[in-house]
Image (cartoon, grey):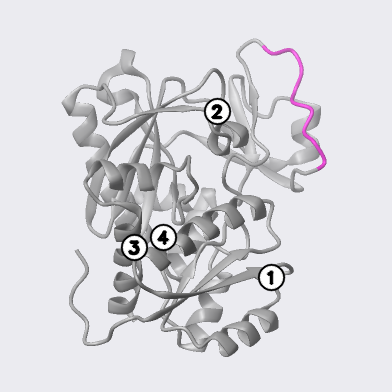
Amino acid sequence: MAGRSSRTAHSVAVLMGGPSAEREVSLSSGRECADALRVAGYDVTEIDLGTGRGDEIVRRLSDARPDVVFNALHGRWGEDGCVQGLLEWMGLPYTHSGVLASALAMDKTRAKEAFRAAGLPVVESVIADADEVRRRHVIPPPYVVKPNDEGSSVGVYIVHDGANQPPALGPEMPARVMVETYAPGRELTTTVMGDRALDVTEILTDGWYDYAAKYTVGGSRHVIPAAIPDEIRQACLDMACRAHRALGCAGLSRTDFRWDEARGIAGLVILEVNTQPGMTPTSLAPEQAAHAGIDFPALMRWMVEDALCRS
């Protein structure tokens, strides 16, 4: 999928950690990626960013002098375009999406605007003051409240149909939040690798697919390929590629869907696109790659060489 390059990467710096709410996920992803990159034959430097300060990254990357940076950061600063801009300024090739695509995907409202412009189905939502959401229902239940610019199900609240009280949002929530009409149905996800959608996984949990379900062994069950009609499978593959292109993504991305099977194809909606899917032992993107015959070290090699080819 990646074109040929006259350059070859020998050394890779893996950025991990950082100051976001997803620091622990990033550390887990980064360690897994670093180990697999070594198996793939690269010289690897692991860089755990505590504060995420720009001068710290510049200093440590200048010392490491890598051929390619593998960005395993998650959440704000690491996947919202900030570190991507810094790496562009340093002239270092890096994995995953660039500045604009990263910023668009992290801002759920802007991402939805891009999806609508591309003719892709999304659920309705509004941005509201968190204090107002605590006082009253800003849209009729059922609905979901989440940060507009975080990932990995950090700070997600579900208000069920018939709820008398608005949600008691915790102090971790930002001052302004997204309130989104609840999309019923089955949880589906598709990984895009370059210009190819790999497959469709169904995620089965006892409740909401929250942070614990995503990152705890046994927290969820993944069915790949998903037991869904071929029409829905093909729609997921097509929509994931179109969403990837609508945001201008590069490398690897993962698109999450909800499918209300009672409504057929009309019940399929995009929830969001993750430009830097998790790379932990329970993560979905490596699992889909493995199902397609691409083991973890081979996936890491593809991502590094893809980054080099795009530089």
Which quadrant would the N terminus be assigned to in this image? bottom left
Mark 3 touching mark 2, by CB under 8 A?
no
Q: CA distance from mark 1 to mark 2?
A: 30 Å
- Front residue (pair 181, 58): 58
Tag on residue 219? 2
* Secondary element at image label 2: loop
Q: Which three-letter amino acid code belongs to the residue tagged 3?
A: Gly
Tag on residue 36? 4
| Left/right of residue 39 with respect to residue 15 in the rendered view | left
Q: CA distance from mark 3 to mark 4?
A: 17 Å
Is disc 1 surrounded by few (<14), some (14 to 19) or many (20+) residues within 10 Å?
some
Tag on residue 52? 1
Q: CA distance from mark 3 to mark 1?
A: 23 Å
* Secondary element at image label 3: loop
Where does the magenta region start and end?
163-171
Query: Compared to 274, does 104 lie above or below?
Result: below
